[in-house]
Image (tube, rainbow, N blue to C red):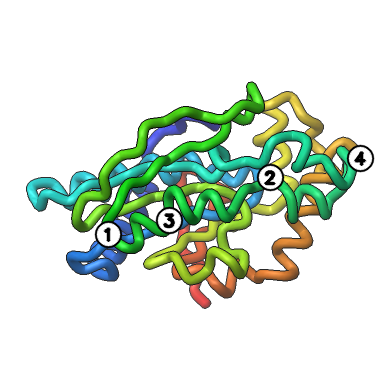
Amino acid sequence: MDGYRLSAARRELLRSLAAEIAAAAGEGPSLVAVDGVDGAGKTVFADQLAAELEAGLAGTGRTVVRASADDFHHPRAVRYRRGRQSPDGFWLDSYDYPRMRAELLDPLRAGRGRFRTAAHDLNSDLPVDEPARPVLAGTVLVLDGIFLHRDELLGYWTYSVFLDVPFAVSATRMAARDGTPADPDDPALARYVGGQLRYLAACRPRQRATAVIDHADLDAPRRIAR
């Protein structure tokens, strides 16, 4: 899935979203969320959306910043405190939201101060010593991650996208990427699928998102009318 081609339909959709985001932001700061279940294709979608935004904002002096919620995970001791197979643990304990807000979202939303795009390395389970950068006027943040329409983050987004992908499709993508089981009902995926089902039920991201995208076909994504 990584590096999939930019088809004509995909490029047209991204350009349309980028134009809407620029209009919604005006000249002020803009925080954009790209949400979806594991394997929905969030990272590449957010990369491509950020590239379209950069092209559209060229010459304006505005900056596009890319970041991922995966760089604000809790340490393993916190993530697995309810048990390594716990769906509640995945849904409730994966991410350090206070730190994400304090170090990334709050400064960029305010348009002043300094910010960091990473605080924790998931592979090493160690803190990331990233130098803080000054917030520039009119910065546009594009942040990808799961659970981004949860209550404590909802008020941050100038614009948000939810990539709608069935678990049968996303699990197959993750199997190709990570070597995990392709069947979403496999017990090995119970923590992750169960945690995301809790999120979908509690937060209804399809209703909360500015734009919902059917992302099952990577070459022909389409906006879902609501």
Q: In this orientation, does residue 83 appear? A: yes
**Are circles 1 and 3 on residues that touch, CB within 8 Å?**
no
Sequence-wise, the earlier of marks 1 and 2 is 1
Q: Nearer the viewer, residue 34 or 174?
A: 34
Q: What kind of element bears circle 3?
A: helix
Q: Amino acid at mark 4?
A: Pro
Q: What kind of element bears circle 2?
A: helix
**Res 187 label:** 4
Residue 148 image offset from top left, x and y in percent? 56, 58
Labels 1, 4: front one? 1
Sequence-wise, the earlier of marks 2 and 4 is 2
Labels 3, 2: front one? 3
Q: Amino acid at mark 2?
A: Val
Q: Residue at x 68, y 34 (%)?
A: 174
Q: Residue at x 49, y 47 (%)?
A: 144
Q: Which residue is mark 3?
A: 105
Q: What distance separates the C-alpha of mark 1 from that of mark 3?
A: 10 Å
Q: Amino acid at mark 1?
A: Gly
Q: Which residue is mark 1?
A: 111
**Are circles 1 and 2 on residues that touch, CB within 8 Å?**
no
**Res 169 label:** 2
173 versus 95 height, above or below: above
Residue 199 image offset from top left, x and y in percent? 71, 62
Q: What kind of element bears circle 4?
A: helix
**Res 34 label:** none
Q: What kind of element bears circle 1?
A: loop
